[in-house]
Image (spheres, rainbow, N blue to C red):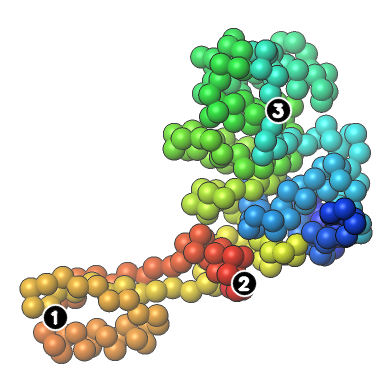
Amino acid sequence: MNLLQVRELKKSYARGLLGRKVSVLKGLSFSVPAGVVTGFLGANGAGKTTTMRCILGFDFVDSGQVDVFGGPLNVAAKRRLGFLPERPYFYEHLTGVEFLQFYAHLTAPIKKAELRARIERLLRRVDLLFAKDRPLRNYSKGMLQKIGVAQALIHEPELVILDEPMSGLDPDGRLALAEIILQTAKQGTAVFFTSHLLHDTERLCERLVVMKDGKGIYEGTTEELLNKSGFELEVSFLKNGERQLVKVGTDIEVQSLLMKLLNDGAKILEVRRLRLTLEEIFVNMAMRGGRT
């Protein structure tokens, strides 16, 4: 079931003194299903933030359609959404507990006992229970990012939109947040997020939406994209007492190489199949003008 459906989305802005129209989104379409982590990738300026603003109703679209939970965005649908912007604003005089209480009350009434239990669970999940009574002004950047994620989850939304959630986190923090994202999806929540940390994206995302210049250039599973982008075969061998590595592109080439090496008296140590990383594929697709 798709909780978010974007169809032929177009958006332009007036720029400069003369108000010249600049097209940002040029017919973008994609979907986000329930219970799945979907990564949203694109180079800087591709239109990712504009897309999120249109989905959340911050900007009006020129044309196209955005359906959330099967219909247009309204107050009831917003209560079922969680959102963490790339540059969130924090009320620094509030403590961690007070901050989560404030955002919980903005969405829907929650009984006090349930809210206390929910806040404690979330603070434990993001490893901030020790700082629950500290003012946010005393939080580090990484701690603020974690409390921001907790804010997005406090009302137990069905769809969570996260803009660069890994920003400012050290490796331990990224690992902890990755676990939270995976757990959230396992509970049936759709997670839709952007990130420039493509190693984390490759590990976390079951599905990907890749855009370039305001248009979608790939939508599908991460595994399919990685597999269709091709493999390299790496042959490790000993020859004249020296270990060497050779990479070839096809099974036929590796068979020919193995026969030649054996005829030359080399000892084959290993044959490994290597595939491109998501980062390499993304650079070729969205940064250098190519398509996979």
Q: Earlier in the sequence, mark 2 or mark 1?
A: 1
* Image coordinates for residue 174, horizontal then vertical, percent: 50, 38
* As drawn, 49 above or below 109: below
Q: Decide if residue 214 is on the left or right side of residue 257.
A: right
The answer to which image quadrant residue 77 occupies is top right
Q: CA distance from mark 2 to mark 3?
A: 35 Å
Q: Earlier in the sequence, mark 1 or mark 3?
A: 3
Q: Which mark is residue 49?
A: none
* As drawn, 81 above or below 154: below
* Of labels 1 and 3, the one closer to you: 3
Q: Decide if residue 129 is on the left or right side of residue 214.
A: left
The residue drawn where x is 71% and y is 10% is 113
> What is the three-letter code of the residue carrying label 2?
Gly
Residue underneath mark 1: 266
The answer to which image quadrant residue 137 occupies is top right
SS for tag 1? loop
The residue drawn where x is 55% and y is 28% is 141
Question: Is residue 69 visible in this depiction of the protein?
Answer: no
Residue underneath mark 2: 289
* As drawn, 132 above or below 252: above
The residue drawn where x is 13% and y is 88% is 264
> What is the three-letter code of the residue carrying label 3?
Tyr
> What is the three-letter code of the residue carrying label 1?
Ala
* Image coordinates for residue 112, horizontal then vertical, percent: 75, 10
The residue drawn where x is 69% and y is 64% is 212
* Disc 1 residue crowd, few under 14, some 14–19, many 20+, Cα 10 Å: some
Q: Are marks 1 and 3 in contact (CB under 8 Å)?
A: no
Residue underneath mark 3: 89
